[in-house]
Amino acid sequence: MEEQSVERARALIDLGRADRARIILTGILAVEPEHVEALLVLSLAQADDEPRASLENAQRVLSIEPENLLALLLCADACLELNRVTDAERYARLALDKSPWLGAAHAVLAQALGRRGGRYEESRQSAQRAIELDPENAIGYVAAGYIEMARAEWSEADRWFRKALEVDPSDRTAQVNLVTAQEGRGRISPAFNEAAVLLRIDPRDKDALQVLHETVYTTLVHLLWISTLLFVIAWATGTA
């Protein structure tokens, strides 16, 4: 019975109903606190909105199964969200020790290294390795985009996120970060339009909402600057 409930929760996450999945999984764990699959899926359900809780549940799995690969990756991902870059690198390297052929582990390591000063070449190589190992998975391309975005190389970041979307048009991380890259390049209108598209898909998408708010703010600042400039010109020429 529990296994069917876990699979139902996993399906709900795929449908964007992580909130409902969390309720189901919390019920399972209230009866069986060390149910590894329920802990893993709960950690996955919490990854976007509750990274600290996601990390705690993945660590609970590691206390039961120290070599659980998915738990290591979930810990690394949560640490990235919490900006615990050293811990993220440590978990990613542990995952690679167990599965050096796994593209996702190389991608997570690439993102961790990309946030550390002076590690660009190493991070780029890790992202490239992720792509080589799993070219049909968007995660390697997203990692490469993150690395360039951390260096404010917006055009390169834009290129990698577009490649990720060629591989998987539904990848939400690539969609959101493409909007951010376009905003960084000063392409306000495309960024605004694509953020609006994301919100039409999921009006509760907190990342898209944040990008939309930032884009609107940037647009207003630009308009204010233009208005001020026109006023100064008019005053200087005596037409104000």
Image (tube, rainbow, N blue to C red):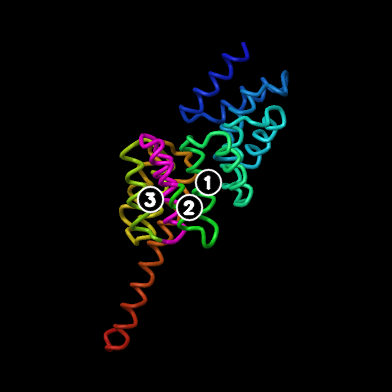
Q: Are marks 2 and 1 in contact (CB under 8 Å)?
A: yes
Image coordinates of residue 51 in percent, x first then y, are 61, 41
Q: Badge 1: how crowded within 10 Å, few (<14), some, or many (20+)?
A: many
Give the total of numbered labels. 3
Residue to which mark 3 is pinned: 179
Instruction: Say above or below: 206 vs 13.
Output: below
In the foreground, 27 or 103? 103
Q: What separation in Å lies between label 2 and label 3 (alpha carbons)? A: 23 Å
Residue 142 part of the magenta segment: yes
Look at label 1 and name its amino acid: Leu
Q: Are marks 3 and 1 in contact (CB under 8 Å)?
A: no
Residue to which mark 1 is pinned: 109
Image coordinates of residue 1 in percent, x first then y, are 62, 10
Who comes first in sequence, dot 3 or dot 1?
1
SS for callout 3: helix
Look at label 3 and name its amino acid: Val
- Residue 47 visible from this viewpoint: no
Residue 147 part of the magenta segment: yes
Residue to which mark 2 is pinned: 123
The image quadrant of residue 61 is top right
Q: Badge 3: how crowded within 10 Å, few (<14), some, or many (20+)?
A: many
The part of the chain drawn in magenta is 127-152
Look at label 2 and name its amino acid: Ser
Provide the major secondary structure of the magenta segment: helix
Q: What separation in Å lies between label 2 and label 1 (alpha carbons)? A: 7 Å
